[in-house]
Image: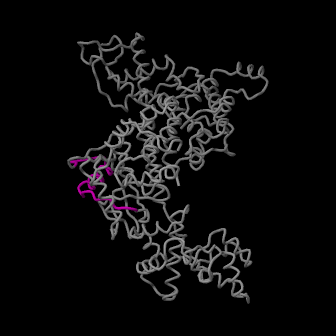
Amino acid sequence: MSPHQMGLGMTLYAELHADGQFGEVGYALLFDLARQELRLFPDLRSATADDNAIWDYVGDFLVERGSGVTVMLLASASDEEAMGRLLRTSLRHWLIDQVRKTARGALRRRLERLVSEDDHFEVVPDGQPGAGRWRLAGGNWAPVGPSLATLRAAAWAVRDVRVPPWTSHERRGPAADEPSLHRIMVAVLTAAGGSLEPATIVAVFADRLPHALDPAEDFLTEDAANIADGAEGDDPAQVLADREQVDQAVQRGRDFYWEMSADERRLLPYLYGAIGEQMKATGRGKSQTYLRVSALKERLKALLGGGDDKDDQLTLDELLRMCSASIDAPPDSRDDLASIPVSPTMPATMPRTVA
Amino acid sequence: MSDQHRHVPEHVLRAGAAAAVSRNLLKAVHAAESAAAVSSPARGQLWRVAWDGAAQLVVILEATGPDAAKVAPVTLDPPVADAASVILDATMTVLGQPATVWGGLAHTVPFLVFDLMIGEIDSVVVDAVERVAADGNPGDLPHGMRVGAAVESAFDPIAEIRAELSDEFADLAAAAWAPEISSEPARPLRELLRERSDMAELMKALAGLLGAGLPDVIDLMKGMRPVTPDQASAIAKMTGLTIGQVLSAASTLPAGLITELDHPRWRKALQARRRPGEPESAARLRTAYGVLALAARQTGAASAPAWRQRIHQFLSIDPPQGAARDRPAG
């Protein structure tokens, strides 16, 4: 029996079947789920300190998704347990959307700054066709509407995208450094051959820099962060000396590590393993695992893409080391993800080819 | 829950009330739950499917045989779709909300997962769902339908939703409860222990060991009652058999009995026979062997009984829970 049943002698299942809407138990359950789920999203976590803020999220969720959710619960759930699970999933999907909206807004502001400050780009002035759109400077480019696939391909063809070193574990890292943003913007606008709506460009950047929007950032424990930083309790002078010897390729691996979601970190050591191992690493089914493998390979390909072989291998080795260390860390607070042991068949180094 | 009678702000109550389901849907669900007769799954029906924690809505595209149907997932939340799926307006189903039918994720699932028939969808709509899923060409869609947008990137949030659905339906498609049918006929305990001269004492000892009555032990000896691995271990110790011999001593369930039990008409009764904490598969297995034992007692093992009648008879004489006859043999 759930605490909700014990406390109020009723269930959400019974409430929805009786009245077709949330009652006292349903609201209490929604509040508890919202508080738990909000903790999973660093961007939203501050809301969990205040009951009123949590209720605001519950209210917004009901306004935006409530009609579909109540119908879904009543029609799909065969018991209280299934109802609770479906409600949690819906709430989590909605919160992910909220974070993405926030992150997309931040990305847009960053790109607006780039377009206004970088002489290579400009906003189409009032009075010209496509006023308000973005374009390469000095070409008098006309408004165009190429397919998103074309723009996406151009953005992903830009390799070696750098992300500035990021030390905070609490907040999302920057999308990319300024030269990288510049190169992607040039590639996208060149492929377009004209001016584009800012929203289109933001969508392409969001696809190319998924870490900038990825809300599935689990909290790193202090232990994991220390291991990842190489400060494992050895002689501090030696640690410092080692750090000084870390070359740019290794640093690139570290920077990328901080962009990775917890899921990606668990998956990386198994990226070229069997699907069964990969499914254990993600704690998810085959389709979801394939999707994650494919996305991570695409990101690694873009990270490495045609650079020096030795540098790339160092980068991958460093990534593998950090990811292997982090999966030894205590499990996080997400109750639906398995705690994954290090695979005994984990390769000593990552394969060079990122297929 | 930290605060059992938490004060719910007025704006939340208003939002909750505005999100109430329609009276039509509430009536439809109540009617489905209390229906005396349950239809066989057929094209165009809207069903709830559920098994082992997974629960979804589906529309049936085709009944593929006596015990399985091809279905397309139907979702209401989140409000997303891909290019192989169609979005139905709120007026097109009893749900009263826009719904996505994922024709591209159609799976064939066994009848045993069908839980509740909620309504039906016009055949023209089902035709369109199949057309869009087959070649992405919507043609002239019925009024109130539109096709979703293409997912072009592994980073698209819709790709994630689609992958979740696909995994859930792969699990539903693999749902099963009956043991694999063995090519070797089972050797019941009675046969394995035929050399023993102390059979009567042994049966009494087994009854004590398993906390069961003698009729249950007789069924066990005849292979008409399954044993759990724990029970098999204890029986093996007492009889000198191997655990494998004990586990394989139960009779193979007839395919006709499994097919009949998988029909949705028995779902409610079988769910009611679940004991706290046990999966539905355990209640199904127990019931199946109960029906088999009853059939063997009444007609002899060689006859071909009408399973529907036998199940009905067994359920009517064997109360769902807590009754001595239905106690597990341990």
Total number of numbered labels? 0
When the figure is inspected, residue B317 is found, relative to residue A5, above or below; the finding is below
**Residue shown at 37%/30% (left/top)?**
A150
Q: In the rendered view, how is the structure colored?
A: one colour
- Give the quadrant of residue A354: top right
- Give the quadrant of residue A348: top right
**Residue shown at 53%/49% (left/top)?**
A3
When the figure is inspected, residue B215 is found, relative to residue A175, above or below; the finding is below
Q: Position of residue A185 (x, y in %)?
A: 42, 20
Tell me, yes or no, if residue B80 can be seen here: no
**Left or right: A42 as drawn, with respect to B89:** right
Extreme right residue here?
Answer: A235
Q: Nearer the viewer, residue A212 or B224?
A: B224
Q: Nearer the viewer, residue B117 or B181?
A: B117
| Residue stretch rendered in magenta on the structure | B115-141
Tell me, yes or no, if residue A7 can be seen here: yes
When the figure is inspected, residue A104 is found, relative to residue A347, above or below; the finding is above
**Residue shown at 49%/84% (left/top)?**
B295
Instruction: Assess whether residue B116 is covered by the magenta stretch.
Output: yes
Instruction: Assess whether residue B96 is covered by the magenta stretch.
Output: no
When the figure is inspected, residue A137 is found, relative to residue B160, above or below; the finding is above
Q: Position of residue A272 (x, y in %)?
A: 59, 42
Q: Position of residue A160 (x, y in %)?
A: 53, 24
Q: Nearer the viewer, residue A140 or A28?
A: A28
Q: Position of residue A56 (x, y in %)?
A: 41, 33
- Give the quadrant of residue B16: top left
